[in-house]
Image: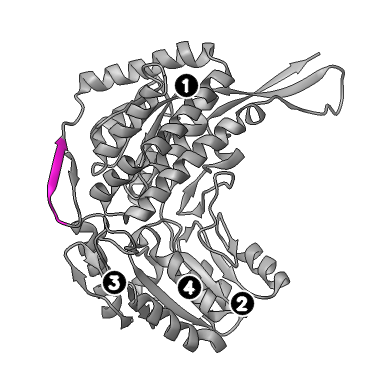
């Protein structure tokens, strides 16, 4: 394993970073543990929140530099990279603004007896974060922000292709005044991560990544009785049942599929359209996608850059070819040029086609025809994932009815890209366990301690 910045647009290796030694790793865990037992316990919630407030400010002060780093690392178009930095700052600020309320005592009304009872939220200790490459700043913010405010300390293992952004995040925590050990960046190998999870000084682990990685980490965490939060893959349905603005709905569908070069866990990936709208939707959707061609991610106005790596593009190419071998039709696109991949539409994907159960991480959309609301819901749920989902309808009662029946952690009605720092993020089934962001995100790694007074 090697940590390196490899520009996916050019294939050029720009810089490599050494993997941490076992001795350095032990020192890092020790520093995080010492910081928890010292600074995290002695500092007030206001003092901890002040550190996070400064981290948020530094994201904005350094936004151009930070954005340019992730364009180099994973090919995100520059305008989207700037937007990600801003969103990360918003997440940190949410936990600053709500710190005292999130950690306030929660009274319990007693059913019998005298006295009182409260739930008091307290930190648990050192936490390990294993983060993905697709949102290098945002993913870290939603894990580190609430937990540092709570009083936990962080060991952060970022993706191997994001060593420059991970170092920049650690530097911001240092420059914000965080004590040594509060936030520690580790360039660790997979084998070393097993050691970290097993270490008795570490109390929990949060991973965002693939099903395979989540399964491996959950197995190790379970063996050592460690709390784990997992945000894994998704193949989110976009269910269109009715609309009074087909062009607007089509644009929403395009935006939901192409955000972050199509490499978002909760992107719309399967477009399930009621029979009477299917033909006009597919025609307009395909035409709109065809207008978006891959381009230079450093250029202003680029909507679609390269995939995160050549390997990622090759894997997506193989998926499309397998889908076609099993009967799918390529309505549009389907070709690759290095790490750049055309916007692609697949139709005629049968329920027994492996593609119908897979996550396509890139600008590939599948379209399905549904003859009824029930069939649309059945198609939406016929996957091993359950992360996000989208429902478009002009019928408010239908919207809530369908939202209730969709098996997902999140349902967005008549809108896309509506994530917010205050909104919990997470899924069910093979999309993971636990939640991040909002109040629920701050409740994952805390000791909800009962204090009963007689």
* Residue drawn at x 78%, y 28% as measured from the top left: 108
- Dot 4: within a 10 Å radius of its alpha carbon, few (fewer than 14), some, or many (20 or more) residues? some
Which numbered disc, 2 or 4, marks the residue closer to the eye?
4
**Left or right of 130 on screen, residue 19:** left
Give the secondary structure at mark 1.
loop
User: On the image, numbered disc 2 is attached to which residue?
Assistant: 374
Disc 3/disc 1 C-alpha distance (Å) = 47 Å
| Residue stretch rendered in magenta on the structure | 10-16
The reply to whether dot 2 and dot 4 touch (C-beta < 8 Å) is no
- Dot 3: within a 10 Å radius of its alpha carbon, few (fewer than 14), some, or many (20 or more) residues? some
Rendered location of residue 257, percent (x, y): 41, 66
Which numbered disc, 2 or 3, marks the residue closer to the eye?
3
Tell me, yes or no, whether the highlighted magenta stretch contains residue 14: yes
- Quarter of the image holding residue 377? bottom right
Q: Earlier in the sequence, mark 4 or mark 1?
A: 1
Give the secondary structure at mark 4.
helix
């Amino acid at each position: 394993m090697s940590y390196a910045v490899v520009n996916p647009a050019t294939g050029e290796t720009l810089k490599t970073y050494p993997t941490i030694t076992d001795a350095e790793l032990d020192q890092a865990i020790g520093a995080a543990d010492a910081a928890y037992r010292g600074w995290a316990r002695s500092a007030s919630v206001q003092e901890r929140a002040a550190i996070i407030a400064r981290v948020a400010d530094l994201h904005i002060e350094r936004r151009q530099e930070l954005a340019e780093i992730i364009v180099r690392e994973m090919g995100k178009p520059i305008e989207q990279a700037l937007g990600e930095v801003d969103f990360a700052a918003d997440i940190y600020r949410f936990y600053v603004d709500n710190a005292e309320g999130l950690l306030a005592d929660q009274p319990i009304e007693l059913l019998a007896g005298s006295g009182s009872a409260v739930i008091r939220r307290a930190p648990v200790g050192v936490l390990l974060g294993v983060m993905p490459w697709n949102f290098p700043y945002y993913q870290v913010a939603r894990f580190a922000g609430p937990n540092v405010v709570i009083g936990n300390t962080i060991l952060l293992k970022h993706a191997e292709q994001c060593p420059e952004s991970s170092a920049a995040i650690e530097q911001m925590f240092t420059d914000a005044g965080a004590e040594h050990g509060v936030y520690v960046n580790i360039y660790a190998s997979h084998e070393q991560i097993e050691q970290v999870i097993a270490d008795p000084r570490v109390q929990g682990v949060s991973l965002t990544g693939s099903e395979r990685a989540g399964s491996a980490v959950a197995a190790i965490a379970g063996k050592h009785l460690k709390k784990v939060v997992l945000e894994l893959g998704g193949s989110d349905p976009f269910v269109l049942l009715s609309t009074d603005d087909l062009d607007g709905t089509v644009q929403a569908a395009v935006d939901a599929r192409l955000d972050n070069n199509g490499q978002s866990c909760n992107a719309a990936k399967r477009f399930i359209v009621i029979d009477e709208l299917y033909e006009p939707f597919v025609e307009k959707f395909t035409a709109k996608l065809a207008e978006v061609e891959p381009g230079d991610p450093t250029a202003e106005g680029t909507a679609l850059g390269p995939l995160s790596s050549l390997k990622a593009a090759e894997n997506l190419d193989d998926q499309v070819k397998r889908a076609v071998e099993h009967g799918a039709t390529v309505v549009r696109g389907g070709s690759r040029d290095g790490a750049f991949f055309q916007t692609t539409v697949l139709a005629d994907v049968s329920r027994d086609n492996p593609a119908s159960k897979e996550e396509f991480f890139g600008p590939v959309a599948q379209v399905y025809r549904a003859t009824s609301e029930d069939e649309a819901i059945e198609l939406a749920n016929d996957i091993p994932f359950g992360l996000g989902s989208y429902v478009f309808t002009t019928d408010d009662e239908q919207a809530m009815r369908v939202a209730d029946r969709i098996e997902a952690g999140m349902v967005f009605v008549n809108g896309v890209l509506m994530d917010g720092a205050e909104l919990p993020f997470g899924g069910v089934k093979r999309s993971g366990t636990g939640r991040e962001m909002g109040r629920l995100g701050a409740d994952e790694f805390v000791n909800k301690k009962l204090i009963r007074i007689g």
